[in-house]
Image (tube, helix red, strand yellow):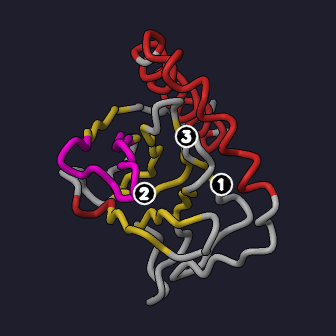
Amino acid sequence: MKKQIRQLLILVTSLILLNTIMWSDFTNSANTSNKGANHERFASSSDRVVSIPGQLSSESNVVFTIDGGKGLVASFKEENGCDGRSVYSFDTLTGQVIDKLDTLNSNLSGVTPTRLTISSNDVLVISAKSNIPDQVDFIIVPINPDGSFAENNKVNSSFRVPLTEDE
């Protein structure tokens, strides 16, 4: 029950943050209406294999930039077997890794990315599990047109989510 409550709180907070980002981009929605045409050119490249360092989980989700040209995924385990802390961007046509974001380089105390969400203006929201008890973390970072992470515009936030023992 405790785990389900934590997951629900992470989901709700993530949706609130994503909604805020999407509404802030609402005035620019006319600029993105023509980008949908690019999806067609990527539809025939489904036979590409992307080799991500480390290990993925069946619970790992993949998100794509608005033009479909870049994908983003978080690792479940690092290459050395430690808990995953990396988010990778990759080219959907070639399958090549473009960039890596290390969530441990943030101001937060050891976070493990659990869920990715992306806005219509290519801003990535990373929900993360913290090493600190009763805390959830979020990393919000724009994706540059080349698929790299705009780390100079990255925002980290933590929320204390106290949980009580089930009675």
Nearest the eye: 154 or 90: 90
The residue segment tinted magenta is: 137-154
Residue neighbourhood size for the residue with mark 2, other residues' Cα within 10 Å, grouped as few (<14), some (14–19), many (≥20) = many
* Side (left or right) of 109 relative to 74: left
- Location of residue 56 (image quadrant): bottom right
Q: Residue at x 64, y 67 (%)?
A: 93
Q: Residue at x 28, y 36 (%)?
A: 157
* Relative height, residue 41 to residue 57 (above, below): above
Nearest the eye: 120 or 157: 120
Q: Label 2 belongs to which residue?
A: 147
Residue neighbourhood size for the residue with mark 3, other residues' Cα within 10 Å, grouped as few (<14), some (14–19), many (≥20) = many
- The quadrant of the rendering that contains the N terminus is top right
Q: Label 3 belongs to which residue?
A: 117
Q: Percent x, y for residue 67?
A: 59, 44
Nearest the eye: 3 or 75: 75
Q: Of marks 1 and 3, which one's residue comes earlier in the chain?
A: 1
